[in-house]
Image: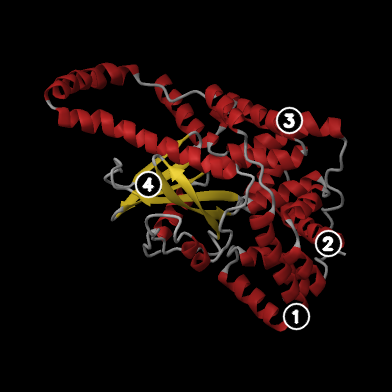
């Protein structure tokens, strides 16, 4: 029995380590600097290992690790940074119209410009954009963010609209 | 359907996450509404830009090594060891002493296979860490493949030129073990996938398709005629299999 459990740990561990790049990328865009990103990833894996018994086999390991990383970030890093968290993204305003020049700006944006625009958004906006980009479902993003699915939908929609606007503003 | 309803559903529509009824309603609305069509176009473009141009920050190798050292390796079952492995090893020792051919198959071949996997992961990491753009940076396979002409002593046969799921980012010439290889770089969302194509002659290439993982990366290797193919990435195993099927030209 103990051997089976240990075997599970090894098996999940191999799979978990495959997400190191993804988690580091998410950590980098949350923390905003390399040393904190590395610490955040290392602490995420340490916490995951300690609470491995809480992971349900067959569920999404990637989403589970993202949730641990995000919770670690909130509890350990966000407080001392004092940066904006949600920044008005939970409004129910409709998605605004889009001008053709906004689409043109998107097509021409360079890598460093899009990174700067993304980093100018509040942390939760960055998180939902990246988690969505990683292929997590709205339900999984909601579990990671600790909010309702409806909130994820509106937050993602507003976050992407805000990102488009910032890219458009930078292109002017 | 109102514009507000349609815009709320645009992302789910693009990801194929709507019910058939909702999807039809969104399509009909977009066909009749130019302002919402612009929103849809902007969302699609933003997704492409994020997937293809947002700088990626993969975990440094030193961090991966630390993580791998801290995470427990799968243990060996003592019960199994006593009951099965010990007798098997004893039998194997006899067989190995008697038959060099079996020795080659049981010892040399796995070692060569491990070397191949290790080389593939190292080369993929080099591609990821390289600050230089790909030598032939193009999403058009008909520009990338001709670029190899005169740079390789074989023609890399790759039918898959990328698609929305796995866009092609470019190609380059690299070294794989003792020979030159064609390197094709694809993307899967934010992840990079390297495809190495090389002459397999003289190498102990796996007789059957090899699927394994090493240092957090997944590897699929196979042989087609004289050429060996290796795919490496940190994407999910299923996604890498999907790309392998496309490269091999297997029907979806």
Q: Is A16 or B247 nearer to us in this picture? A: B247
Q: Earlier in the sequence, mark 2 or mark 3?
A: 3
Q: Which residue bears the numbered disc 3?
A: A35
In this orientation, does residue A60 appear? Answer: no
Percent of width and height locating residue A88:
87, 52
Is A170 displayed left or right of B223 in the figure?
A: right
Residue displayed at 49% across by 68% down: B142
Q: Secondary structure at mark 1?
A: helix
Instruction: Please report, as a chain letter, where disc 4 is located.
Output: B
Q: CA distance from mark 2 to mark 3?
A: 30 Å
The circle drawn on residue B221 is 4
Instruction: Please report, as a chain letter, where disc 3 is located.
Output: A
Instruction: Please report, as a chain letter, where disc 2 is located.
Output: A
Q: Are marks 2 and 4 on the same chain?
A: no
Q: Which residue bears the numbered disc 1?
A: B34
Quarter of the figure that contains the N terminus of chain B:
bottom right
Q: CA distance from mark 3 to mark 4?
A: 35 Å
The answer to whether the residues at label 4 and label 1 have Cβ atoms under 8 Å apart is no
Q: In terms of image quadrants, where is residue B31? A: bottom right
Q: Nearer the viewer, mark 2 or mark 3?
A: 3
Q: Are marks 3 and 4 on the same chain?
A: no
Q: Residues within 10 Å of mark 4 (few under 14, many from 20)?
A: many
Q: Which residue bears the numbered disc 2?
A: A165
Residue displayed at 72% across by 76% down: B37
Residue displayed at 24% across by 22% down: B84
The circle drawn on residue A69 is none
Instruction: Please report, as a chain letter, where disc 1 is located.
Output: B
- In the image, farthest residue toward the front: B150
Is A60 displayed left or right of A35 in the figure?
A: left
Q: Are marks 2 and 1 on the same chain?
A: no
């Amino acid at each position: 029995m103990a051997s089976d459990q240990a075997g599970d740990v090894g098996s999940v561990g191999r799979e978990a380590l495959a997400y190191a790049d993804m988690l580091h990328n998410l950590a980098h865009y949350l923390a905003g600097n390399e040393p904190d990103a590395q610490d955040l990833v290392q602490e995420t894996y340490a916490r995951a290992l300690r609470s491995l018994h809480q992971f349900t086999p067959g569920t999404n390991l990637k989403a589970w690790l993202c949730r641990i990383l995000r919770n670690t970030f909130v509890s350990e890093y966000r407080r001392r940074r004092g940066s904006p968290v949600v920044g008005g993204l939970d409004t129910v305003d409709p998605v605004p119209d889009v001008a053709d020049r906004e689409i043109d700006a998107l097509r021409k944006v360079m890598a460093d410009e899009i990174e700067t625009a993304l980093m100018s958004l509040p942390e939760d906006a960055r998180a939902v954009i990246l988690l969505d980009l990683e292929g997590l479902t709205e339900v999984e993003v909601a579990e990671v963010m600790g909010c309702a699915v409806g909130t994820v939908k509106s937050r993602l929609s507003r976050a992407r609209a805000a990102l488009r606007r910032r890219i458009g503003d930078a292109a002017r | 359907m109102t514009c507000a309803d349609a815009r709320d559903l645009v992302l789910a529509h693009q990801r194929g996450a709507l019910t058939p009824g909702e999807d039809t309603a969104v399509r009909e609305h977009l066909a009749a509404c130019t302002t919402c069509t612009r929103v849809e176009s902007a969302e699609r473009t933003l997704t492409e830009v994020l997937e293809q141009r947002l700088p990626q920050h993969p975990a440094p190798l030193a961090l991966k090594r630390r993580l791998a050292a801290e995470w427990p390796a799968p243990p060996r079952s003592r019960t199994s060891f006593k009951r099965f492995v010990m007798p098997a090893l004893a039998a194997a020792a006899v067989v190995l002493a008697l038959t060099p051919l079996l020795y080659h198959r049981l010892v040399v071949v796995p070692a060569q296979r491990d070397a191949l996997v290790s080389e593939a992961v190292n080369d993929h990491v080099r591609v990821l860490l390289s600050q230089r753009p790909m030598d032939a940076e193009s999403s058009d396979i008909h520009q990338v493949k001709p670029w190899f002409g005169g740079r390789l002593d074989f023609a890399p046969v790759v039918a898959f030129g990328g698609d929305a799921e796995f866009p092609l980012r470019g190609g380059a010439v690299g070294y794989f073990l003792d020979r030159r290889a064609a390197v094709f770089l694809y993307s899967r969302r934010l992840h990079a996938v390297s495809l190495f194509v090389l002459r397999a002659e003289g190498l102990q290439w796996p007789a059957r398709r090899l699927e394994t993982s090493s240092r957090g990366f997944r590897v699929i290797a196979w042989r087609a005629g004289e050429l060996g193919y290796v795919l490496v990435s940190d994407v999910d195993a299923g996604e890498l299999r999907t790309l392998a099927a496309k490269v091999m030209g297997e029907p979806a």
